[in-house]
Amino acid sequence: MRLALGLGLGHVPLGKANTVPAPTAIPALANLVTRFSADSLSLGNGANVTSWTDSINSIVAANATSGERPTFATNRLNGKPSVQFPGAWPTIKRLMMATPGALATAIDSKDFTVFIVFRTLGGNATSNPQAGLLTTDNAASLYLSADGQNVQWNNVAALTVPYAGQTSFSTIGQTAFNTTPNYSGTGALQSFYVNGGAASSVAVAANATGGQPFTIGSLISNNPSNAEIFDILVWNKPLTPAQYMQAQMWACDKYGQAYPWASVTAINTFFGDSITQGVGASTIAHQAPYLAAQSLGLNFGQWHNIGIGGITVANMGVLAPSWVDPIPALISKKINLVGFEWHNENLTNPTLPLPYNHAVTYLAARKAIANQRTVWGTSTSESADPIANRASYNSAFDAAHANVDSYVPTPTSV
């Protein structure tokens, strides 16, 4: 049965045992500040979309130039319509927001979530492959793009992942933490999602809009997408990974799609420090969680990389109850929680045996969650080796790791 977090399914009336479960609710509805939905428009198939108004704060996206307007397409997914932006350079289809209001306020706060339901309409013949779905006219600001082969965030090459499946039902999104606690070394974080699964993160604050206008379908002057968009949702808070998965469930239910994780028995969730996250890799496609997912044949939405640069084990324990512990019950699947962290914890709490004790406490709490399995490594070497604390930490775990389902001992020399 599909579970609706925060939405009571109620009991099934007698004689109606086959009643279809209620669809999943949109998470954190009170924080939703922008919602462009194609099914809010009442137009004929093939009609030009002159304007599109969001249903939360009445933000208008429009275009006065007839040749640049997208078109309305009926019965695209589960009987629902889309707004199509069939861009092919130099032709650009786009809608622009002259007064973005609450949307701009959310992005400028650097505490937000963006979630876009879309699919591309084939390849993209642009002079720049980063084809904007939702952008500001500022290359150093919000920029979610899909070009038929890759998806990218913030117009940053390192934040690109190959994803050819975007010609089918897809979602792309971003969460940004600024004043909302995330316990990174910098105090800020951005996480990047495809199909409900976190693909990577960076421990830096999101860029503000710089006062630039928002555009759906391209930048103001270039980079047209070749896609159809079903929904754009923006919250004025960063969703947790569990909440973001709930948003994915909402979208799948609305458009009659299977959940991305339906075919797997467990989801690998990489949660640890910057090394767990994949610091130092040139692109997301070279980070360890992505490579592990590829080796296991997993698609986006079937794994998470929610590593946080600078986090300690103690602060992993602060975030885990809301970030990861709700996931098994939400999706009715097992979770393999993969990670390790010694360096940051040792810097903060160098007195033995605090690093070990904090890790034991963290792991015991995670094991108390039904259907959550733990995979734990010890430590990695660094230039200051040999470090007595590291050797002691490794030895302590070698001797006792009762709450670890799969233990990965790392010798002091590694």
Image (tube, grey):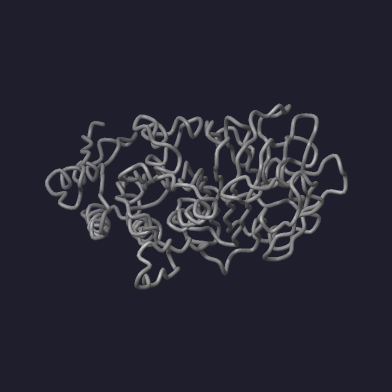
Residue at 79%, 59% (x, y): give it: 99
Residue at 37%, 41% (x, y): give it: 276
User: In the rendered image of this protein, does residue 379 appear above or below residue 62?
Assistant: above
Q: Quick one: quadrant of the C terminus? A: top left
User: In the rendered image of this protein, does residue 158 appear above or below residue 319?
Assistant: above
| Residue 283 in view | yes
Q: Nearer the viewer, residue 182 or 245?
A: 245
Q: Quadrant of residue 87?
A: top right
Q: Nearer the viewer, residue 2 or 408?
A: 2
Q: Residue at the left extreme?
A: 399
Q: Quadrant of residue 137?
A: top right
Residue at 45%, 40% (x, y): give it: 300
Counting from the top left corner in percent of width and height, residue 130 is at 66, 34
Counting from the top left corner in percent of width and height, residue 90 is at 80, 29
| Residue 340 in view | no
Total labels: the figure holds 0
- Left or right: residue 15 compared with residue 214: left
Q: Residue at the front extreme?
A: 15
Counting from the top left corner in percent of width and height, residue 36 is at 67, 56
Q: Quadrant of residue 57?
A: bottom right
Q: Nearer the viewer, residue 354 or 207?
A: 207
- Left or right: residue 305 compared with residue 170: left
Q: Quick one: quadrant of the N terminus? A: bottom left
- Left or right: residue 4 compared with residue 368: right
